[in-house]
Amino acid sequence: MNQDLKKTLWAAADKLRASMDAAEYKHIVLGLIFLKYISDAFDERRDELRAAFADADDELYLPDAADHDEALEERDYYTMVNAFWVPETARWEAIRAQAKQSHIGVRIDAALEAIEADNPRLKGILDKRFGRTQLEPGKLGELVDLISTIGFGAGHHAKDLLGEVYEYFLGQFASAEGKKGGQFYTPASVVKVLVEVLAPHHGRVYDPACGSGGMFVQSEKFIEAHGGKVDDISIYGQEANPTTWRLVAMNLAIRGFAADLGREPADTFHRDQHPDLKADYILANPPFNISDWGGERLTDDKRWVYGTPPAGNANYAWLQHILHHLSPHGQAGVVLANGSMSSNQNNEGAIRRAMVEADVVDVMVALPPQLFFNTQIPACLWFLARDKSGALLPSPASGRGAGERGISAGGEGQQRRGRDRRGEVLFIDARKLGRMDTRVNRVFDDEDVARIAATVHRWRADGEDGADEPYADVPGFCRAVKLAEIGEHGHVLTPGRYVGAEAAEDDDEAFNEKMERLTAQLAEQMAKGAELDAVIREKLGGMGYAV
């Protein structure tokens, strides 16, 4: 989908929003997009079956043409290829035919209920609120007509196009919704950094505050871009907000993910839906600095290995929850507020010291401002690792289970041995990277993401980016630091404290010569300025406004 069409869709949808705020309206729009997609996917499968029934060489061939129409309504023909079954009354054209009727909202809710009844994996996740919308009369029908202009096409392209529309709308809603938008959306460029650094090719992937599922979607894109299979990962997530929990379930369902999001929406700290999970990769953007997380009820929790987090700030509760769920060779990437790197309030400094001394902190990245729609709080990335010894790790092409087979280093599909980086932390200051995408929001371009990821992989020497080039400190950008030096700085983890200043370019010009040249240039510019002043005075005097 081109940018012009996406902008047109958003402009029209936003105009239709009327008095309904974005927090409510996003569920209306995204629900309709989901309904349109599964209906299009159903029609695609229906066309495939129609052709197969008429093809004598196809295993589904039906010699009697009179049987074809009846067979097209056989549910099993759709579920056998993992397609959603859409009852006749819930198909998009049936809904569109009634779009201008006053009861269209109730009609859509009934369609969603029918779809849930026939598709167990969608049970309880479709948001049926259309009959209660506060849109002006006729506006919902206009929105149905608008969504009808999105043609999802066929095959993998349809899924990709849906993903584009879905992510675009999520981003636009996050921007419109402001602070509340951060509850469900992490900017794609930030997610890319986490995914490219962690490189989740196989194993269990977990997000304890999964929002709309952006971490999972980007992991899928990474795996496919590197020639892997999405089936090589198992997805686990948790989300407390009931509407957002439904949103992520829909987002993953349209991509065919078999994700475990727990039995219900639930608070991660108090009702952990995956208590026994040990994940190979954890990616998370939890809420920053939350003070009402109920920490006073969890003072003796087994997760607090490095110290009891303060009841007034959940940052170190998130870090320890994530470490608790890491497998012995697991890695994690976490977005947190900058204060987490240096705060000494209420035991946070002691917890950070214990984590550093336990050598579970792998990489720290300082981010530039204005990356997030919902907050101006400066943010950073924590990368954690259970094992920094350089144990055998799967190469990018190894696929599922390579580590269990004990394949030796070297060659595609085998393992690479990482560098032993115990007793060391990599600091990256990325505050100068990125560009302003809008007046208020900054983004990382692919080159920025690649620079950060390549730096980490070279330092670890365990990934495709680090296979051929050695790591080297870059003043002002990155530096590998021993734990002893970190201790000398009070276990503060702010990258700017360690990477130093960017090297100034040496032009080999002697100081005296440079000063003579610059003063002469300044004198010339001052003379020109005086001439311009005289001209301006003359012109103003001629107009009767002498100065």
Image (cartoon, rainbow, N blue to C red):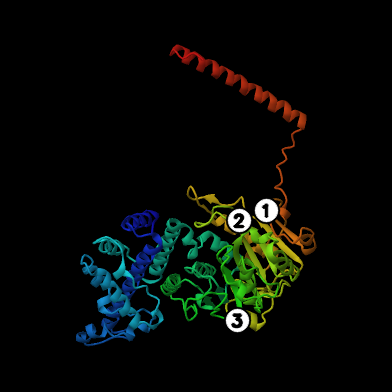
**Which of the labelled discs sits on residue 367, or is there none?**
2
Q: Is residue 326 left or right of residue 225?
A: right
Q: Looking at the image, is mark 1 or mark 2 earlier in the sequence?
A: 2
Q: For residue 281, what is the image quadrant? A: bottom right
Foreground mark, 3 or 1, reads 1
In the image shown, does 406 or 262 lie closer to the viewer?
262
Looking at the rendered image, the quarter that the N terminus falls into is bottom left
Q: Secondary structure at mark 2?
A: loop
What amino acid type is highlighted by mark number 2?
A: Leu
Q: For residue 393, what is the image quadrant? A: bottom right
Crowd class of label 1 (few under 14; some 14 to 19; many from 20; radius 10 Å): many
Q: Looking at the image, is mark 3 or mark 1 earlier in the sequence?
A: 3
> How far across and down, in percent of the image, does residue 221 sit?
50, 67
Crowd class of label 2 (few under 14; some 14 to 19; many from 20; radius 10 Å): many
In the image, residue 311 above or below residue 442: below
> How far across and down, in percent of the image, does residue 46 sit?
29, 77
Spatial CA distance of label 1 from label 2 is 12 Å
